[in-house]
Amino acid sequence: MAAEALILVTVSRTTGSVPREVGAWMAVGRDGIQGTVGGGHLEFDAIARARAALAGGALEVEVRYPLGASLGQCCGGVVWLCFERIAAGEDLAARLASPPLRPLALFGAGHVGVAIARIARDLPLALHWIDSRDGQFPAEPPARGWRQEVCDPAADAVADLAPGSAVLIMSHNHAEDFELVAACLKRQRQQQDLAFIGMIGSRTKWASFRQRLQARGFTETERAQVACPIGVPGVAGKQPAVIAVAVLAQVLALPA
């Protein structure tokens, strides 16, 4: 609930090159601000208009902003901002459009898994986090809408993953990783509804897995659906947080 009266500023329309997408929002109070519609002079003017309205001035419902020289921004596009009053005590969250969330299945709650989960809290991802061991998840509660599951064997959870899931495999041992990859490829053979299958590990590990998967009857085309090593190329460092950033960037780059 809004503790004070606010002005909700929302990107309602755009054309050309602009800093934020339709639906991006910013809530402006007399002293504080939550969210952003793109920064720069665009946002500076929007804040000024919103606070003038909070002080008793008139409120324009929609304002057109050409992002050219006159506004000091060189994006070149046009943004329309919508301004709405939010009364004190009104539920701000109910007025906001929820961005679509990509389902992310994370197998493994080790150091890298924990780092991925912590960073993913601020990303448009719906996490289904699975580990085969009891007591492995962090003590802090999961983010709203997230699911944590203890499943032994972990591969049994693959059948219940949300369609369109990006799957990250990084369990505590290679035998479990192998069975998870095999279960994902079996699901792909039957349903072809996983958006991504990535496994942490070296090229040597993947070479061994490729041979074993071939012995299980998986074709070259099927095996090519697995990304290993994972993470966007060019990111150096093996610290859990560094790996997590590289992996999540790879997930975010997947087609919608």
Image (spheres, rainbow, N blue to C red):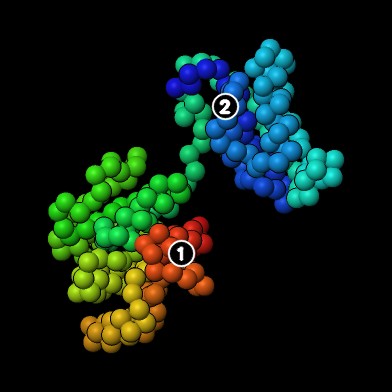
From what the image shows, is residue 123 above or below residue 62? Answer: below
Quadrant in which residue 190 is drawn: bottom left
Q: What residue sits 14% from the left and 60% below the top?
A: 152
**Circle 2 — which element?**
loop
Is residue 195 shown to the viewer in this render? no
> Which circle marks residue 256 in the picture?
none
From what the image shows, is residue 10 above or below residue 255? Answer: above
Q: Earlier in the sequence, mark 2 or mark 1?
A: 2
Q: Amino acid at mark 1?
A: Ala
In this view, the residue in front, 256 or 67, is: 67
Quadrant in which residue 191 is drawn: bottom left
Quadrant in which residue 159 is drawn: bottom left
Q: Position of residue 103 (x, y in %)?
A: 38, 53
In this view, the residue in front, 230 or 215, is: 230
Could you classify mark 1 by the number of other residues whose Cα lies within 10 Å: few (under 14), some (14-19), or many (20 or more)? some
Q: Position of residue 182 (x, y in %)?
A: 26, 74
**Horizontal placement of 124 versus 207: left or right?**
right
* Residue located beneath label 1 in the image: 246
Q: Position of residue 13 (x, y in %)?
A: 68, 40
Q: What residue sits 56% from the left and 36% below the top?
A: 35
Q: Residue furthest right?
A: 70
Q: Amino acid at mark 2?
A: Gly
* Residue located beneath label 2 in the image: 32
